[in-house]
Image (cartoon, rainbow, N blue to C red):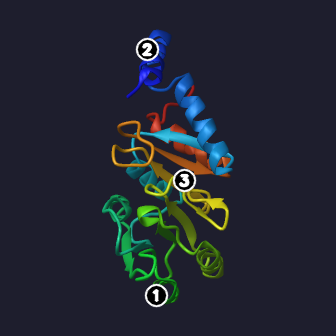
Amino acid sequence: MGEKERKYLKDAFDSNWIAPLGPYVNKFENEMASYLNVGYAAALSSGSSGLHLALKIAGIKEGDRVLCPSLTFSASANVILYEKAQPIFVDSDPNTWTIDLIACEKAMQKYKPKACISVDLYGQSCDYDALTDLCKKYNVLLIEDAAEALGADYKGKKCGSFGEMGVLSFNGNKIITTSGGGMLVSNNEDVVKKTRFLATQAREPE
């Protein structure tokens, strides 16, 4: 922590915006959306909560099948179980450690999943040209877990900007940290509005 961090922390306290959000959070969302070249972003309590909300917004329900790479942090699979859906684990490519495309297509053919959570593991992106084509071919919603890949790109496009929804993490072990926290990003404004609504106790404006 340096002098700027201390100054901004004091500014946040002096503004009296302690919870749930405030000007600095709004700036953070806007700057991250601009950096990733996506339309909208919602700051959240964690990357895990972002993945969970992504599945909720995607309409994943009990008994639905969701693809997930077998090599990942447990949150990528845990969120599927939160919705009582069935995780279908797909092997990883030994060259990239990301989801294996041949195994992924076989799983799509066999299990007819509703969604696929791709994971950009250790900052290594998936082969998104091929993966997005597969998802379109089999009508599978793509959710990008880019928790470990902020700053990485695939063919000039930033990780986090590929799926219908992308998820980032700002945990203490990440590229940029806010001590904790995460973010859901999307080019669909309604998705991010619903994310923010659910993440702030689903309060109606009454």
Query: Which of the marked residues, 2 or 1, is nearer the chain's N terminus?
Result: 2
Looking at the rendered structure, the secondary structure element under dot 1 is helix
Q: Secondary structure at mark 3?
A: loop
Mark 2 crowd level (few <14, some 14–19, many ≥20, 10 Å Cα): few
Between 134 and 140, the one lying in front of the other is 134
Residue 113: x and y, percent? 49, 77
Q: Tell me which numbered mark, 3 or 2, is placed earlier along the sequence.
A: 2
Q: Nearer the viewer, residue 112 or 29?
A: 29
Residue sitting at 65 percent across and 82 percent down? 137
Residue at point 53%, 44% (across, down): 195
Within the image, what quadrant is residue 62 found in? bottom left
Tell me the quadrant of the picture where the N terminus can be found. Answer: top left
User: Which residue has dot 1 on it?
Assistant: 103
Q: Which amino acid lies under the numbered mark 3 shown in the image of this protein? A: Gly
Between marks 3 and 1 in the image, the one whose residue lies nearer the viewer: 3
* 190 horizontally vs 17: left or right: right
Residues packed near mark 3 inside 10 Å, few (<14), some (14 to 19) or many (20 plus): some
Q: Amino acid at mark 2?
A: Lys
Query: Hey, what amino acid is under mark 1?
Result: Ala
Which residue corresponds to mark 2?
Answer: 10
**Image position, residue 19 (x, y; %):** 43, 23
Mark number displayed over residue 151: 3
Q: Secondary structure at mark 2?
A: helix
Q: Is residue 138 visible?
A: yes
Residue 25 place in picture, x, y as percent: 53, 30
Q: CA distance from mark 3 to mark 2?
A: 28 Å
Q: Which label lies toward us, 2 or 1?
A: 2
The answer for how far apart the CA atoms under marks 3 and 1 are is 28 Å
Q: Position of residue 37 (x, y in %)?
A: 68, 50
**Callout 3 touching callout 2 (CB < 8 Å):** no
Figure check: 77 above or below 175: below
Using the image, determine if residue 154 lies above or below residue 111: above
